């Protein structure tokens, strides 16, 4: 049976029919598993409905799965859907499903699992929630979303959507909803330092000056400290090239000692020499004092390449003990690509060592990609911002150390939009040429 309606909010007759077709089997007091027989098909218009099949032979853990095929029609879009009612408003639930694809160019956009909390009349009580997948070793993707049930919700519509592909397939399997008494709470204390050395005679003197601020910041128990761009050169008489050094080298060694002393991660900008090339580089030091990663500034202003610097050519992200981070440097914030590339690779927190720049674009990069961002600078605001662009903490000349407690798992439900963390990637169009 296919339900055709053009609005995401169900009208009462359709809602009542879905409720009659809802089947759930409790396998424990907390977990609901949804059998294949509970799922019905939906498309906004009959003429763009994809092909729906119950595949009796193919599945992830046993035979049987839900299949959708776009049958060579790029306009095709539809979903398997069902309604769940045996949940408790106010509690948090972990939605989990698995899917596998074939002949798909962009599954971030084309595979669209959604959760729609509704009242008894089938009206949405908040915007739909989009879930994202993580590739597993057996080639199935795990979709997971922790969803607090709104107090006014009496039913949950689950949609397993697919479309906008010329000729692709998707299989969905092992779909469950589990009460989660202890949803993840990854709390990170992020510190920014706002300071500009003046009149020092060496890179080492600059680093020691910043080291004193790191020692002072340790009282705030930071998990990660961000220093500005070019900490070895600012305020000295030396050029970028004259002050350049290998990485690892003397500056990373000293920063490593400070990181190990205070059991914190440290990010800082310096000028790296490798053979005849000099890069504007940000380094990441872990809690043990080891060099955990580095990023070479990819977008150089003409003042830097005229001074002999070379641009980097990669957008790495790095695993920490609290989540994935990305590093961008100064002029990179002027362009959307660096932050976007790192967010696509899973970065949840961007660290921005910067000399000075746009105080509008730095929060915009956080909003664009639904990530937290920490800037440390000489000539603009040094702040910690959340994925909505709100400033959580700011360091100034008068108060040069600022720390914010950020919650990487916090869900920001924006009015009319919902949680943009996964929705952003569903509606982005990387397939359209920009040149």
Image (cartoon, rainbow, N blue to C red):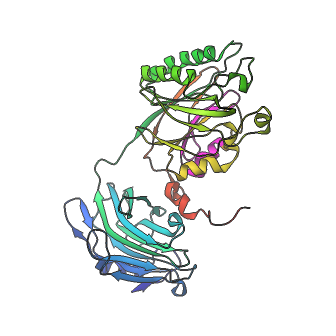
Residue 114 quadrant = bottom left
Residue 291 in the image: x percent, y percent? Answer: 49, 30
The residue positioned 39% from the left and 75% from the top of the image is: 81
Q: Quadrant of the C terminus?
A: bottom right
Quadrant occupied by the N terminus: bottom left
Q: Decide which of 113, 148 is in the foreground and name it.
A: 113
Viewed as shown, does residue 34 lie left or right of 387? left
**Taking the image as drawn, is residue 348 in sight?**
yes
Quarter holding residue 327: top right
- Position of residue 334 relative to residue 54, above or below, is above
Front-most of residues 251 and 144:
251
Q: Is residue 31 left or right of residue 308?
A: left
- Is residue 313 magenta-colored? no
On the question of residue 22 being in view, the answer is no
Q: Magenta residues?
A: 362-391
Residue depicted at x 54% and y 15%: 212
């Amino acid at each position: 049976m296919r339900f055709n309606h053009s609005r995401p909010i169900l009208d009462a007759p359709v809602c009542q029919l879905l409720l009659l077709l809802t089947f759930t089997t409790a396998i424990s007091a907390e977990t609901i598993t949804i059998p294949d027989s509970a799922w019905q098909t939906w498309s906004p218009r009959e003429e763009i409905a994809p092909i729906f099949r119950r595949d009796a032979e193919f599945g992830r853990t046993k035979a049987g799965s839900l299949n959708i095929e776009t049958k060579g029609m790029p306009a095709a879009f539809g979903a398997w859907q069902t309604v769940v009612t045996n949940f408790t408003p106010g509690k948090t639930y972990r939605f989990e499903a698995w899917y596998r694809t074939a002949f798909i160019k962009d599954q971030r956009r084309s595979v669209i699992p959604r959760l729609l909390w509704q009242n008894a009349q089938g009206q949405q009580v908040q915007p739909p929630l989009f879930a994202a997948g993580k590739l597993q070793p057996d080639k199935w993707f795990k979709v997971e979303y922790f969803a607090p049930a709104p107090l006014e919700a009496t039913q949950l519509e689950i949609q397993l959507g697919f479309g906008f592909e010329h000729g692709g397939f998707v299989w969905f399997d092992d779909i469950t909803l589990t009460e989660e008494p202890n949803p993840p709470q990854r709390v990170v204390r992020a510190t920014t330092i706002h300071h500009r050395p003046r009149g020092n005679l060496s890179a080492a003197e600059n680093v020691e000056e910043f080291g004193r601020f790191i020692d002072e910041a340790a009282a705030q128990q930071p998990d990660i400290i961000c220093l500005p761009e070019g900490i070895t050169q600012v305020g000295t008489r030396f050029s970028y090239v004259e002050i350049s050094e290998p990485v690892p080298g003397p500056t990373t060694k000293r920063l490593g000692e400070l990181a190990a002393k205070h059991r914190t991660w440290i990010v800082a900008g310096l000028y790296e020499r490798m053979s005849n090339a000099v890069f504007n580089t940000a380094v990441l030091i872990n809690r043990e004092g080891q060099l955990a990663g580095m990023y070479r500034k990819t977008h150089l202003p003409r003042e830097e390449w005229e001074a002999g610097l070379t641009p980097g050519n990669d957008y790495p992200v790095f695993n920490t003990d609290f989540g994935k981070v990305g590093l961008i440097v100064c002029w990179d914030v002027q362009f959307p690509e660096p932050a976007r590339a790192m967010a696509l690779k899973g970065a949840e927190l961007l660290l921005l060592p910067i000399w000075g720049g746009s105080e509008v674009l730095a929060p915009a990069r956080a909003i664009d990609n639904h990530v937290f961002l920490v800037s440390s600078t000489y000539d603009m605001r040094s702040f910690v911002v959340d994925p909505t662009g709100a400033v959580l903490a700011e360091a100034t000349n008068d108060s040069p150390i600022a720390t914010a407690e950020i919650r990487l798992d916090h869900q920001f439900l924006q009015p009319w939009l919902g949680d943009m963390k996964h929705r952003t990637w569903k509606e982005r169009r990387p397939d359209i040429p920009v040149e």
